[in-house]
Image: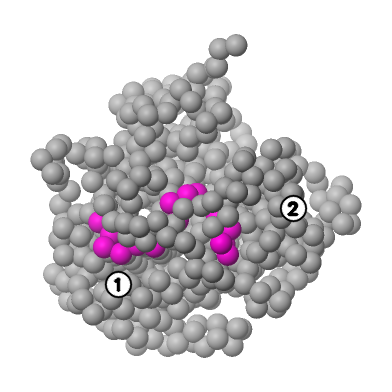
């Protein structure tokens, strides 16, 4: 497999040299390929300072742009709705991933339908209306009703998981009701069974290659959305990759050592400023040296599996790029690689409720970890390291929940190997794609008014080396998830950790000097905090964000 990986990488780099100086003819609609990984850490790519081998992704970065200040929503379904709509997730209908035990009061309310509503029209639908062939594989997570299937939102072909996660080898979930929880897969307009024996990343790549070949035959511009479920838990790999033990011993020094190593690598590569102070560790887990030797071995094995999943995904991303080259599609394709949110802190095996079923129906004994019958997740300590130098992880509105790597490469991207630090958000991608395709967002769709996109087009900023970000001193970005809320304006940010209804609980940070969000400046800059709080309250009312109310006794 290493040999195949090397060959694929060399082919990729060789073809890049040939095509570096080719320009896309004017007025030709570009192909778009978006590769979204699930719960990926900020520094998991080699080009972002990782020890994990990602040569195919790194090659894209060498021939494109790395955006280091890219923001998402704190959780997957809201992020994906922002991506598809160019709008806030509440506007779309995915205000939060609702939990029956805690969010009953929000069910069905406007903004919390857990479906893509007709208040917006997806950019994929508009591309389809203007001659694009669109296809999506992998995690969809935008609703279970037929109305929310991809086929009704601009995708001619789709093979997707409608749930938030699944075993990578089958359709078994892990809900509170136990192992009988089945995940749902949809092929176009039909619920289908998982292909027996297939591993998710392999299967989704094969499907996307099938769709890329179909796009070639149709001679249409295409939008391909490769929405991988890796490296989301359960941490699993095909047997041939497991047996290689590619990262054996790499993480034996522990999660605190990895956090510091990643931090230094980020500085060295220019991803974060050289003068950034190394933040203290979070106090939510035991220091590595306090673990027993067996505990340390188990923790190291978790991270070995995770790293293997990222490298395995990179290998298959290389297959997609190679297909584009062989089909003659690559020179007119813009390629993006990103995550949907920060790294997950979940540790199912030790959870009080789901952990019961995890232990009952799965074997997480060391020899079995990573196989189909295991259910491994890496938990808070490793998630904190993967999001170094930030505070928190997925579900939080701190940088650890919303910071993602973003690589933009391919057609029309004239700058090679550069790093850009200006703000860009996941809701900016939709208007950018429409701009690149010369498609206008309508005031009405199907004779019904639709809400204008909130995101800003980055087309000129991406294509012109002298271009500037459309964000200015008055621009804001807002994200909220389960009462974790944030508002960003220039380098100033207010954050609330789970009590967003109480404005006194917001903290103020200067990200220029405090990427780790450790020093609350509320007392030093009360006017700035008040300014941002007023912006938050106005946005909350305008969009219709609903916050949890205490449940009466």
State left or right for residue 326 relative to residue 127.
right
* Quarter containing the N terminus: bottom right
* Residue found at x 31% / y 78%: 213
* Quarter containing the C terminus: top right
The residue indicated by pointer 1 is 333
Query: Splitting the image into 4 quarters, where does residue 406 fall?
Result: bottom left
The reply to whether residue 440 is in sight is yes
Query: Splitting the image into 4 quarters, where does residue 303 fall?
Result: bottom right
Q: Earlier in the sequence, mark 2 or mark 1?
A: 2
Check the image and name the residue furthest to the top.
Answer: 553
The chief SS type of the magenta part is loop
Check the image and report above or below for 115 versus 537.
below
* Residue found at x 39% / y 45%: 143
Foreground pick, 179 / 472: 179
Calculate the distance from the C-alpha at mark 2 to the C-alpha at mark 1: 40 Å
Q: Position of residue 100 (x, y in %)?
A: 52, 31
Per the rendering, the mark at residue 219 is: none
SS label for mark 1: strand
Q: Position of residue 475 (x, y in %)?
A: 33, 38
**How busy is the neighbourhood of tag 1: few (under 14 within 10 Å), some, or many (20 plus)?**
many
Disc number lying in front (2 or 1): 1
State left or right for residue 67 relative to residue 288.
left
* Residue found at x 86% / y 50%: 291
The reply to whether residue 39 is in sight is no
Q: Position of residue 521 (x, y in %)?
A: 56, 28
Contact between labelled residues 1 and 2, with CB atoms less than 8 Å apart: no
State left or right for residue 553 relative to residue 211.
right
Q: Is residue 162 magenta?
A: yes
Per the rendering, the mark at residue 256 is: 2
Magenta stretch: give its range: 154-170
**How busy is the neighbourhood of tag 2: few (under 14 within 10 Å), some, or many (20 plus)?**
some
């Amino acid at each position: 497999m290493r040999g195949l990986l090397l060959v694929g990488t060399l082919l990729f780099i060789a073809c890049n040299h040939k095509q570096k100086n080719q320009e896309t003819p004017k007025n030709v609609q570009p192909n778009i390929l978006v590769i979204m990984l699930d719960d990926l850490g900020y520094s998991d790519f080699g080009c972002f300072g990782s020890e994990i081998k990602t040569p195919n992704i790194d090659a894209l970065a060498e021939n494109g742009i790395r955006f280091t200040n890219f923001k998402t929503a704190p959780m997957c379904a809201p992020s994906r709705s922002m991506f598809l709509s160019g709008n806030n997730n509440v506007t779309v209908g995915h205000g939060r991933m609702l939990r029956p035990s805690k969010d009953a009061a929000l069910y069905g309310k406007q903004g919390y339908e857990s479906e893509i509503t007709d208040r917006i029209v997806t950019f994929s639908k508009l591309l389809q209306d203007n001659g694009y062939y669109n296809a999506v594989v992998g995690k969809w997570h935008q609703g279970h009703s037929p109305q929310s299937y991809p086929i009704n939102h601009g995708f001619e072909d789709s093979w997707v998981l409608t749930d938030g996660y699944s075993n990578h080898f089958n359709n078994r979930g892990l809900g509170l009701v136990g192992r009988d929880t089945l995940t749902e897969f949809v092929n176009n307009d039909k619920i289908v069974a998982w292909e027996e024996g297939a591993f998710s990343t392999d299967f989704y790549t094969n499907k996307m290659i099938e769709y890329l070949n179909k796009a070639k035959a149709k001679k249409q511009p295409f939008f391909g959305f490769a929405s991988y479920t890796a490296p989301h838990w359960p941490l699993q790999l095909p047997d041939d990759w497991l047996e290689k033990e590619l990262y054996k011993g790499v993480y034996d020094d522990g999660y605190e050592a990895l956090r510091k190593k990643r931090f230094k690598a980020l500085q060295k590569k220019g991803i974060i400023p050289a003068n950034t102070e190394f933040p203290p560790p979070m106090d939510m887990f035991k220091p590595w040296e306090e673990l027993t030797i067996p505990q340390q071995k188990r923790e190291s094995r978790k991270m070995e599996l995770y790293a293997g999943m990222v490298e395995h995904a990179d290998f298959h991303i290389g297959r997609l790029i190679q297909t584009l080259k062989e089909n003659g599609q690559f020179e007119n394709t813009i390629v993006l690689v990103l995550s949907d949110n920060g790294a997950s802190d979940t540790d199912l095996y030790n959870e009080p409720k789901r952990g019961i079923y995890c232990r009952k129906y799965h074997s997480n004994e060391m020899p079995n970890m990573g196989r189909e019958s295991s259910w491994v997740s890496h938990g808070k300590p490793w998630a904190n390291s993967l999001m170094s130098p930030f505070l928190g992880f997925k579900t939080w509105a701190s940088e650890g929940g919303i910071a993602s790597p973003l690589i933009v490469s391919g057609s029309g991207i004239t700058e090679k190997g550069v790093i850009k630090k200006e703000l860009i958000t996941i809701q900016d991608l939709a208007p950018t794609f429409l701009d690149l395709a010369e498609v206008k967002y309508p005031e009405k769709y199907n004779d019904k008014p639709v809400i204008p996109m909130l995101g800003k087009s980055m087309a000129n900023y991406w294509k012109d080396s002298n271009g500037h970000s459309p964000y200015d001193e008055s621009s804001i970005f807002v994200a909220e998830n389960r009462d974790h809320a944030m508002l960003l304006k220039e380098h100033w940010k207010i954050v609330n950790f789970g009590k967003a209804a109480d404005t006194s609980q917001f903290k103020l940070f200067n990200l220029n000097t405090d990427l780790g969000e450790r020093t609350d400046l509320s007392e030093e800059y009360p006017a700035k905090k008040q300014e941002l709080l007023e912006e938050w309250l106005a946005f909350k009312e305008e969009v219709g964000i609903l916050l949890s109310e205490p449940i009466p006794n």
